[in-house]
Image (tube, rainbow, N blue to C red):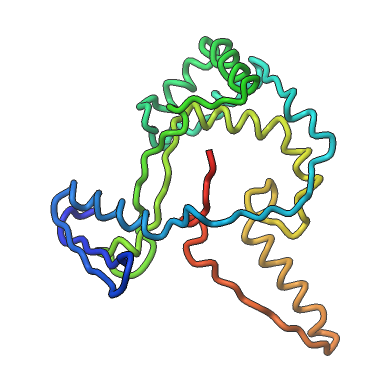
Amino acid sequence: MSVTGFRSDVHDQQPPLRSSAAEKPQEIANLFNSYLISVFSPSAEIILQDSPLPDESYMTELCLTVTEVQATLKALDVTKATGPDGIPAHLLKETAFVIAPSICKLFNKSLTLGIVLNEWKNVNVVPVFKKGETDYTENYRPILLLSQVSKVLERCVLNSFKERLREVVKECQHGFLDDKSCTSNLLEVLHHIGSPLDNGSQIDVVYMDMSKAFDKVCYKN
């Protein structure tokens, strides 16, 4: 990323549109920070459909094993970037056999109390170019780099109840699921549209573009 000539067009509390420029690294970082804050919607209401999980008690009685934690540590991708704690995945992977018992106790304590350490919530925000002109902050999307230990906890919890989650996830969901992807989604849509057309029927399609949807998600602590 160049450290010169960065610009940002962000809205003030009142119109008109304001254009800002930055050249020094600190100024550029502040510019990105201002832009990301401007697109975030902290007051957005989150409406969730009432779809309780079957037998929800298993979620409150979750207890990880040393074997599960060790396997997750061994499966870490050493090419992934290091988070705010500075602990690389390579170190955790190579020492998995030794540190798994201690980390397992720490994870289970966190699950029992329902508390996640603040250090595990910290992230490094890295802007990644998406499209358009490279010197505009609006053309970048934020990537959040968590600490590797917190990602191990997330993976362990997910592995423990992901099969239960499949019971409530709709069949039309293709993202973030094993054995499904953009390709499987496109193939299903192609089949869904192609079959009626082959029979001479009419198909109406509505396209929706959720602009910066992930940037605007309200995360409650």
- In the image shown, does 37 or 188 lie closer to the viewer? 37
Q: How many tags in the picture?
A: 0
Q: Position of residue 75 (x, y in %)?
A: 56, 29
Q: Quadrant of residue 40?
A: bottom left
Q: Quadrant of residue 152?
A: top right
Which residue, as the protein is rendered here, is positioned at the far front?
14
Q: Is residue 96 left or right of residue 175?
A: left
The residue at 34%/52% (across/down) is 127
Which residue, as the protein is rendered here, is positioned at the far bottom?
200
The residue at 52%/50% (across/down) is 218
Q: Position of residue 185 (x, y in %)?
A: 68, 63
Residue 163 shows up from this direction? yes
Q: Position of residue 53 (x, y in %)?
A: 79, 41
Residue 70 shows up from this direction? no
- In the image shown, does 172 or 46 lie closer to the viewer? 46
The residue at 32%/69% (across/down) is 14
Q: Position of residue 140 (x, y in %)?
A: 36, 59
- Above or below residue 16? Residue 8 is above
- Above or below residue 195? Residue 90 is above
Q: Quadrant of residue 129?
A: bottom left
